[in-house]
Amino acid sequence: MKEYNHTATICAISTPAGTGGIAVIRVAGEQAIAICERIFVARNEQKLSETKSHTVVFGQITAYSPRSNSNISDDNGCQLIDEVLVSVFRAPHSFTGDDTVEISCHGSMFIQQKILQLLVESGCRPANPGEFTQRAFINGKMDLSQAEAVADLIASQSESAHSMAMNQMRGGFSAELKELRSQLLNFTSLIELELDFSEEDAEFADREKLKSLALNIKQKINRLADSFRTGNVLKTGIPVALVGETNVGKSTLLNLLLNEEKAIVSDIHGTTRDVIEDTVNIQGITFRFIDTAGIRNTQDAIENLGIERTYRQIEKASIVLWLIDGTNVSEHIEWLTEKILKRAAGKKIILIFNKIDKLSAEELDILNSLFAAFNCERIQISAKLRLNTELLHKALLKAAELPQISEKDVIVSNIRHYEALRSAQNSISRVIAGLNDTLSADFLAQDIRETIHHLGEITGEITTDEVLGNIFKNFCIGK
């Protein structure tokens, strides 16, 4: 992100692109109220400069256009753009901590762009991506981890992802890190005090107590770092690969799970040659279903490329749905088993017998006996007739193995936070090793300072313009 003046007054559309019932245009900065007053006329002639904070005013946005032929221009040439509601938030009691005005206008793209144009002509600068949230961070309204949670909250697609982002935005993660840093600062103050009296060979810190404290801090850091697997899954969705031979019903099953005609269904072998992916929310958990090319021996070069992609998706997935046509168990089942199990080691496999509507009870028993040696969940469905889909949902939720999460649980979902925690793990481990080896105080102090540094990187107590730029450039404009 390029450098810019954080004191400038900025503006942007804060609602999604497109035409809707209403749109919200946000203006923030020292001149926000004065600039908006130049283009807004209150119905009751109230001046925005005299309006109290957290007040909504009804009026009109007008533009001076003396040559306008519009029948909505007055005698002075002021053209009416829209009737709007203007909300005033005075510093520091606003999202950004600056004076802020939010203009709620009708959702016409022409109206939105015209109001933005008037604001820029009156002294605003178009906001950069994430600049409003960045200002909230700079003005001390939130720390960096809370600011990042704003983006996660906007992007949340499930109840679990929403709860996780809300907890982080409300400061649950920050509070835990603040406590760890506080303990470490007390820790290092005693060690560095010894350095000041090194010539007197004084020892102010009880090494056994320090080691106990360091072990406790490491345990907490480990718990936070270990939660990343769960947090990342809740945030991005659990990857589930649909695999099997051609024409066993994978595309039909995908369409069933998504409840839409996403994949082409055909009796022709090898119809699916590329990866098709989409997400579904099941009881608050997002699953990313990936339909793959059917696995078979073929001389078709393009189809073989699709099959290679199937193998890669098996390796990436957390759960593998292995679909088998119950009416026509392939003679290549041993070859197929080797191909799948070789790449699915350590993953949850759910064996699905499809087309059970065409099988008798005796045939189902024979089918189960053929795969009795497979140590994995087995279910029977008819994707075409939508039979036993609830059993598949239950199997997926069981395979996800996600712990019960309360609103107070701190879960790490950001890769930047995870990497900082891993670095903190390494440095606090060196502190513990140093205490065990009776390392000198100056080396201990250095490792403690490194741990404090890495934890501070998460909340933004230690950061750089480059880091801030990389974080906020991925935000949407208007937030």
Image (cartoon, rainbow, N blue to C red):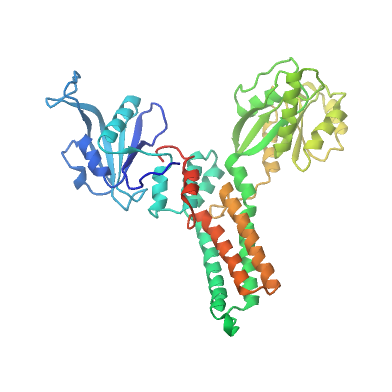
Left or right for 452, reference 112: right
State the residue at coordinates (41%, 27%): 18
x, y (%) of residue 269?
76, 17
Quadrant including the N terminus: top left
In the image as oriented, which residue stretches furthest toward the front? 199
- Which quadrant of the view contains residue 239? top right
- Which quadrant of the view contains residue 193? bottom right
x, y (%) of residue 55?
26, 45
- Which quadrant of the view contains residue 183? bottom right
Tell which of 418 and 267 is nearer to you. 418
x, y (%) of residue 457?
52, 55
Q: Is residue 283 visible?
A: no
Count of numbered circles on the image: 0
Left or right for 422, reference 105: right
x, y (%) of residue 182?
52, 67
Tell which of 196 and 376 is nearer to you. 196
Left or right for 388, reference 62: right
Quadrant including the C terminus: top left
Left or right for 358, reference 122: right
Tell which of 228 and 44 is nearer to you. 228
Q: Is residue 157 visible?
A: yes
Q: In the picture shown, does residue 428 fall above or below 361?
A: below
